[in-house]
Image (cartoon, coloured by chain):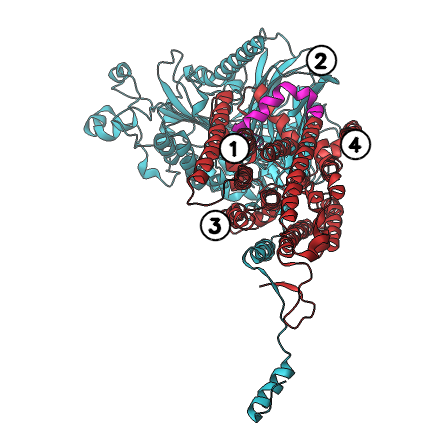
Chain colours: A red, B cyan
Amino acid sequence: MAAPLTLVLIVAVTIRAVLFRSSLAQLITDRVEVVSPINAWKRVVEGLALLDLGVSPYSGDVFHETPLIIYLFHFVIDYADIVFMIADAITAVALYMAVQDYNKGVFRKQKYALEADRYPHDCLELIRTPKEMHYIPLKVALFYLLNPFTVLSCVAKSTCGINNAVIALFILCTVKGSALLSAIFLALATYQSIYPLTLFAPALLFLLQRLYIPVNVRRPSFWLFTMQYAVMFLGTLCVIVCLSFFLLTSWDFIPSVYGFILSVPDLTPNIGLFWYFFAEMFEHFRLFFICVFQINIFFYTIPLSIKLKEHPVFLIFMQLAVISIFKSYPTVGDIALYMAFLPVWSHLYRFLKNIFFVSCVLLACSALFPVLWHLWMYAGSANSNFYYAITLLFNVGQILLVSDYFYAYLKREHHLMYGLHLKRKDGSEATLVLK
Amino acid sequence: MAAYKHSAVLLLCCFALVSDRTLASKPDQNRAEPEPGPESHARKSDAISPREDDSNREPEPEPAGSVQEDPGSRWQATEALDPAEEAAGTRRRAPNDQFQEELVIRPLSSGDIYSSFQFRTRWDTDFFKPGRKVANYRLFPKSLGQVITKFSVRELHVSFTQGFWRTMQWGPPFLSAPPGAELWVWFQDTVTDVDGAWKELTNVLSGIFCASLNFIDSTNTVQPSASFKPLGVGNVTNQKFLRYAVLPREIVCTENLTPWKKLLPCGSKTGLAVLLKSEKLFHSSFHSQAVHIRPVCQNWECKSTSWELRQTLNVVFDLHTSGQSKREWSLFKMFSRTLTEACPLASSSKIYVDVTDNSQGALFELSPSTPSLSQAVVLGDRRTYSVYDLVNPDAFGAQRSLNILLRWRTADSADALRPLLHGERYVAGYGLQTGEIHTLIYNNHPYRAFPVLLLDTVPWYLRLYIHTLSVTSRARDNKPSYIHYQPSKDRLRPHLLEMLLQLPPNSVTEVTVQFERALLKWTEYTPDPNHGFYVGHSMGVSILYSILGSWSSVAMDTNVCVSVFPCKEESTYFVRVYTEPLLVNLPTPDFSMPYNVICLTCTVVAVGYGSLYNLLTRTFQVDEPSPSLAKRLANIIRRMRGVPLL
């Protein structure tokens, strides 16, 4: 199994290396879909240049990366291409191993359930076979490494690739059951962009499940482990933040990084929902809507965790998708991360309602982004509404994709409980509806 | 790096020295000249009151007896006099303020004509003496005096300019000013809240000059670290007390000229100011008016300071639009007025006509001709001027009216004064996403290299990338020896970039920096957003070496030099060079869309929320179809009839 993965890695690195050397690299670097004000490479370089001039990089409004990133690239600025390729490789390998481990767990559970004869008899066709599950980890790595979104993100040297690597390592550590490392990587991811905070719940649920601790608020063991994990997470976060403080001996980075993410002052167009909304917002409603939009991202955590408490990895996928759709400065790199999980849910394919339509929408939008950008910015024959319309459609497409997978997942679980061929009272073939 | 810093500091000191010596010390020479004769005093005493707020002005000097009787007003107005001087001067005291007016006319090689007015008021007073309030004003305008007192201003320089000075065509100006409004102020070091004082001051000045100076806020105010030094006495140069702002979009017109004229002691009723008719002044290629206030030394010892108010107005009339393409200029043709008398309050009132290129009258004919010539070195070049002294009634001739006429004898003219240093600026690139600012600085000196301090302020919505900064001269990298960069803060402060460059002789130095155009909130755009946004000029400051070399042995009448221009008897001089402002387009949102955008985006969020809510709160159930409407109706009828249901 290692050989195909190595092959995929080599192909991926070759593609990236070729693109890095080509004239396309400059073009990709300036694409607003690929880089956002937070993770643009140009801004990282600017931050380093400011540091060289003896100016705090956070004194201006160009650099919004965390101090650790600037510290990292202070040393490896000359090898940035390689760093980003390594980050992508790490993400792919981590996801590969995590999914491999997760699938083993899924298969083991399925085996126990079968032995206990818990599945209805007509559900045999829903049972997953080792053969189809064998290639899933490789497909995940392939989906991540050869996804054009990831390739673009890497060639543009968007630091999103590094954030993805951290999140992938967090998933790997969680799936492997290492609470401490999981907390450390979660803290790192949170430190980088706040939003991964919502991954705390699925990680906790997964670790509890692994330790056979029931999720029950009356059990002291549940609270004990929750406190342990929370302390590890918060402790690490505290250490990282203090470390950042000592790197630059100033707290300027807090408003410049987190204030920037939360208050959305930079309205540079991107593929998200924030920029045009807040460019056109009435001034006295701005604060209200910023609060609504930001709470919206964190809000889904609680109901999703309750609904999916038995399925933490699917919950991670849902959270990643919600973050990448609703975050304030999304880029295609964020989308690539949750899309890498789609092969894991390939067994849901038969329950998906509108996957063809959604795929067409996403593909068409991806193609239309540069076209309408050109018409607006360069040709002058379109205005901002054109680009905005495409971002809306792209986000509707993503929302439909995610809710479709959620629907399919719930439906499969229902069928595994009640049988595949449901009958009405009068004995005719029944259809399932949400009520 | 240490060496660089050292050289930067050296240069800065140099600027401070030169600027102080050129501008601050010169008037003292003038001061040392004999007092105006008794007849001028007589004229002054029976002068009509030319100003509206005359009631506030100090009464004319009177015999000592009345001083004793009315000590209050007397003391208030003259408190700056030395005690020794007071003791000695009990008999008759010279007024401690004086007013001078000058007009310099320079025919330009392009056929255009350049007129430069300067009105200077000096007052030996101290606005900040504790416990004493200056209340009685004579020549010095009360509105500005109160501004100085209230805001503890040490120096104030404000200029309003319409049009761009074409250096290559017209040669260097006497005092350069950027297009639009420019304001820079040094506050006293007693001011604690400099930003607050600055904010209030801009609003007050906005009222005084009827200009949009109230649009100066933190987003266009900077504190340059090296480009400005106080031009008056006092070498305390803590940049904390300096504020500089430019409004490149400001349009200068009559409503700015009228309040400016009201600051003159004679208003626009007599003296040179009668020439300032707005319908002519604003029908010109270039118009620049300025007010400069600074403290200067009272005498050579410089123990006490006096306040100097300089009001300058520079105007260039175009050969074709104002001169009907005829190479013939007269005061009447330029200003539609002739002169009949000097301002009675002025101690000196002179007109200078530049006749340097007109040796033996070969180039143009000047009438009425004047025998008095004066030589001065202006901006490193030796110039000869014909002088008309308006205080002398003979100047007005038999018609009691002076209309200086310049009539060209030949169609071709002399070569333009080639400026040693000048700058240009433009935006490169296409599209609304990124761009590149190019600043070109020319050093035309054949063999000397000059250090230049370049100051650039760029508004925050053009996000500069300082790592893309490149400076090249003669196709080679020219590393600035000093860089001060303050990055912008969104909606708070602009970019500030100051660089010390060494310009090789006879070369063009190109400074380029890339920027990104920001999308603003829809309320932040100007009413005509597709016109573009103005970006202020960049400014070069330098000390130049005169092309004349060592000429200090030339005997000259320093009068022009003293009173009009910042010039110096040495071979170096200080210049500011301004480039054009830029007009940059930004991407715009659709301004008619706010409701639509709010509705549509909220719909998409609601779609996301709704679909997840749907899946989270509902459960799967078998769909039991309800009977059709016809069947239900039939069942109701059957029930009424008592027949078994279907």
Q: Earlier in the sequence, mark 4 or mark 3?
A: 4
Q: Which mark is residue A256?
A: 1
Horizontally, residue B31 falls left or right of residue B90, namely: right
Residue B319, percent across and down?
68, 36
- In percent of the image, x 40 and y 38: which residue is there? B50
Rendering quarter of residue A61: top right
Q: Earlier in the sequence, mark 3 or mark 1?
A: 1
Q: Secondary structure at mark 3?
A: helix
Location of the C terminus of chain A (image quadrant): bottom right
Q: Which mark is residue A288?
A: 3
Asked whether B52 falls inside the magenta stretch, the response is no
Disc number lying in front (2 or 4): 4
- Up-down: is A24 above or below B96? below
Q: Which residue is mark 2?
A: B446
For the residues beneath circles 2 and 3, the answer to whether they share a chain is no
Q: Earlier in the sequence, mark 1 or mark 4?
A: 4
The answer to which of A160 and B461 lies nearer the viewer is A160
Disc 4: which chain? Answer: A
How far separated are the C-alphas under marks 1 and 4?
Answer: 43 Å
For the residues beneath circles 2 and 1, the answer to whether they share a chain is no
Q: Which residue is mark 4?
A: A4
Disc 1: which chain? Answer: A
Kindly check if marks 3 and 1 are in contact, taking CB atoms under 8 A apart as contact: no
Q: What's drawn in magenta, residue-wise? A: A58-83
Majority SS type along the magenta span: helix
Q: Secondary structure at mark 2?
A: loop
Disc number lying in front (1 or 4): 4
- Identify the amino acid type marked 2: Pro
Kindly check if marks 2 and 3 are in contact, taking CB atoms under 8 A apart as contact: no
Disc number lying in front (2 or 1): 1
